[in-house]
Image (cartoon, rainbow, N blue to C red):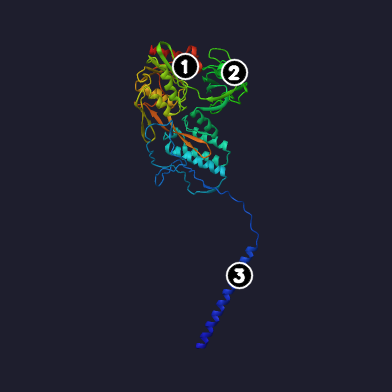
Amino acid sequence: MNNSRSALILLLLAAFIIVCCLMTACTSALVGWRLSQPVAQTTPTPAVVIIYTIAPNNTPTPAPSPTPRPSRTRPPSPSPTRQTTPQPWPTPKLWHSPTPAPTLIYLSEATARHLHIFEEVWRTVGELYLYPDYNGADWKAIGHQYRTRIEAGLSDQEFWTVMDDMLRELNDEHSRFLSPEQVEREDQAASGEFDYGGIGIVNSPIPEKGYLVILLVRPNGPAERAGLRAHDRILAADAQPVCCNDKGESIAQLRGPEGTSVEVSVQTPGQPPRTVTITRERIQTAQPVEGRLLEGNIGYLLIPNFSNRSTASEARTILQDLTAQGELDGLIIDLRVNPGGLNRQMEEFMGFFTEGEVGYSQTRLAKLALNVKGEDVGGSQRVPLVVLVGSKTFSAAEMFSGALQDIGRARIVGRTTPGNLETVYKYDFEDGSRAWIARAAFRPPSGANLEDTGVIPDVEIPLDWDEFTAENDAQLEAALELLR
């Protein structure tokens, strides 16, 4: 009996060993067959992988832990830049763009770079834009629309244009996106170091009238020698229209290589059009601050902009010259063609005429007091002031005139300003482009919302810059009358 049991066990053990051997042989044969097959050719994918993140709904999703999002550059400073101590920006929720089921998509290096910049801009607007209702724009839907366009693939130039189009959907006239070329020109304007071929004018488009108006003419420049003056209208250049594209911008080819000529059709208000040929010259300096004495020891200062970092110092020098023989009986500050610029320059200039708190900057979540440091230049803290404003007075120039009017320091003459007092913050990107995003709005001490009303003159004379000449300037005459 024991012998039979032992034989059975040996038989089962032998059968098990045979089965294992057969399985091993089959596996080896299968692997060998697979290795003998040709390898299917696959298309290599780019190294960059992103996740499609635009949500189809319109409700921002709060982050689990609301902490500030890291930036690729240093934290943006307001431009125009405040002199007050920067305060942290509380963010109760961060904007994300989740999808219920994230999908991996493969992109070219350029498209991935474009989407990276897009996400930075879109989220910053979502979290920090001045107006919580985005001026009536559906920012979630806009994000979905523009991201789809960018994902399809764009050239760099197309991308910069699309990003500017997206920010213009906010309709605040301040938020915008600049190409690297536009950034270079903007930085030149801020530094005062220009270098281009042109005729030597500063102009502004008037889309509803279909022409440009000359705001300023550079002294001793080619335009001045050809007889062009401030207030003149440019109707055409080389027989081509000069105004305007679909964004209301000039399309005139007034700039060009040094030594080349341009035929300009120009009209002085009240006179018939004429045609002049002007040879372009190299332009290397910013439009300077202008100053002179008028009748009765009344001074006049034309501040063309606050974009140039030397504006306040130039004005200081002119005030010193005008008061070298004694204090003025009055001073007229002309901001009618001033488009704004750097708040620091505006605040330094304002400090010649007042000091202390002159208003505050209202953000979506906080108020930041605006204080200016006073400096008396030849009696400038005491001189009676009149400020000229008009439809071309914007931004920091409106802050200046609105604040001095609100505190009773100056009287205002001219035309009601457009009401564009947002403070925009600058964001620079790795491809050299730049975004400006409105994050605050100025309020004078009374709290008046100048965005809604503009700066309303004490003496309203409803004339635009293209409707009169220097010889029949009714607004300047009214300012003189107030000071006589």
Q: Which residue is mark 3?
A: 26
Q: Which residue is mark 2?
A: 265
Q: CA distance from mark 1 to mark 3?
A: 97 Å
Q: Which residue is mark 1?
A: 463
Label 1 neighbourhood size at 10 Å, few (<14), some (14-19), many (20+)?
A: some
* SS of the residue under disc 3: helix
Pinpoint residue 92: horizontal percent, then vertical percent.
38, 41
Vertical order, 208 against 62 (above or below) = above
Q: CA distance from mark 2 to mark 3?
A: 92 Å
Task: Name the foreground residue: 26 vs 306.
Answer: 306
- As drawn, the residue found furthest toward the front would be 324
**Which of the two discs, 2 and 1, labels the residue nearer the N terminus?**
2
**Which of the two discs, 1 and 3, labels the residue nearer the N terminus?**
3
Q: Is residue 388 visible in this depiction of the protein?
A: no
Pointer 1 with pointer 3, Cβ within 8 A? no
Task: Name the foreground residue: 78 vs 328.
Answer: 328
Vertical order, 27 against 371 (above or below) = below
Left or right: 66 in relation to 178: left
